[in-house]
Amino acid sequence: MVADTVKVVDGAVTLVWDWLGNPSSTEELEQLQNCSNLLFSTGYNERRDKWLWKGSKDGMFSVGSVQKELQISNHHVGFYAHEWCKWIPAKCNIFAWRAEMERLPTRVELRKRKINIENELCVFCGVQEETANHLFTGCAMAAGVWQAVSTWCGIPHIFAFTVKDLMEMHKLIPMSARRKEVLRVVIIIACWRIWKARNERIFEDRKSSVAEIVADLKALGFLWLKNRQNFVCVKWKDWCNFQFV
């Protein structure tokens, strides 16, 4: 306890140490002096020792007060908070979060980590360096997937420069809130499937077409939407026409 070491008598502060071995070296004595200076410069009172949480007026800790502290803190400015979705697997949410931050092990990122690779070119087009933004927005493979998704969902052609643009795309489409939520997840699953096709090309020498990626996207989306959420009942025929709400 603070009261065991710091004694305040008539306003005078006295430090009471309980050493296992008294400081003896020059370094230890210097550290003790610095510590004592800090303690003497601190204000003390006669009240009992207790823990106080500075984030609330009553000194009591709560999760709500932490949230308020984070909202007014400047430490998180510039970071993008990924919006989690409960009806797709955690691996897809984590994947989307990492993609937004350029933390996927693309060839450019691997090179930054001092990993030797043959080249940094995109495995699909072989024209530009493989970054997350290129892989999911600039590559011809991605362009084909987004064209197919736009046609399927009945929305204007998806055009983005970054992964963050893709994750925010649903907010710009005039449709119901539920359809926007489904569209957002469709985009996440599409990116995840593109990444899977990329890995299959590298590690299995297997080439996937846009049609195969979109077919898998529809199948996975229907499976997860039907079994992992309870806000809408959907049939395969309606799902293929993006008609469910």
Image (tube, rainbow, N blue to C red):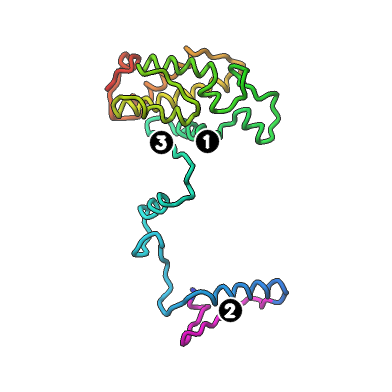
Crowd tier of the residue under label 3, counting other residues whose Cα lies within 10 Å: few below 14, some 14–19, many 20 or above: some
- Residue 3: assigned label: none
Magenta region: 3-23
Q: Which is more toward the observer, 223 or 199?
A: 199
Question: How many numbered marks have been drawn onto this rendered protein structure?
Answer: 3
- Rendered residue at 47%/50% (across/down): 74
In screen coordinates, is 134 left or right of 245? right
Question: Residue most toward the bottom?
Answer: 10
Pointer 2 residue: 17
The reply to whether residue 100 is visible in this rendering is yes
- Rendered residue at 41%/62% (across/down): 54
Crowd tier of the residue under label 1, counting other residues whose Cα lies within 10 Å: few below 14, some 14–19, many 20 or above: some
Q: Secondary structure at mark 1?
A: loop
What is the three-letter code of the residue carrying label 1?
Answer: Met
Q: Earlier in the sequence, mark 2 or mark 3?
A: 2
Q: Earlier in the sequence, mark 1 or mark 3?
A: 3
- Residue 84: assigned label: 3
Query: What is the C-alpha distance between the residues marked 1 and 3?
Result: 15 Å
Contact flag, marks 1 and 2 (Cβ < 8 Å): no
Magenta region includes residue 10: yes
What is the three-letter code of the residue carrying label 2?
Answer: Trp
Pointer 1 residue: 101
Quadrant in the rendering for residue 131: top right
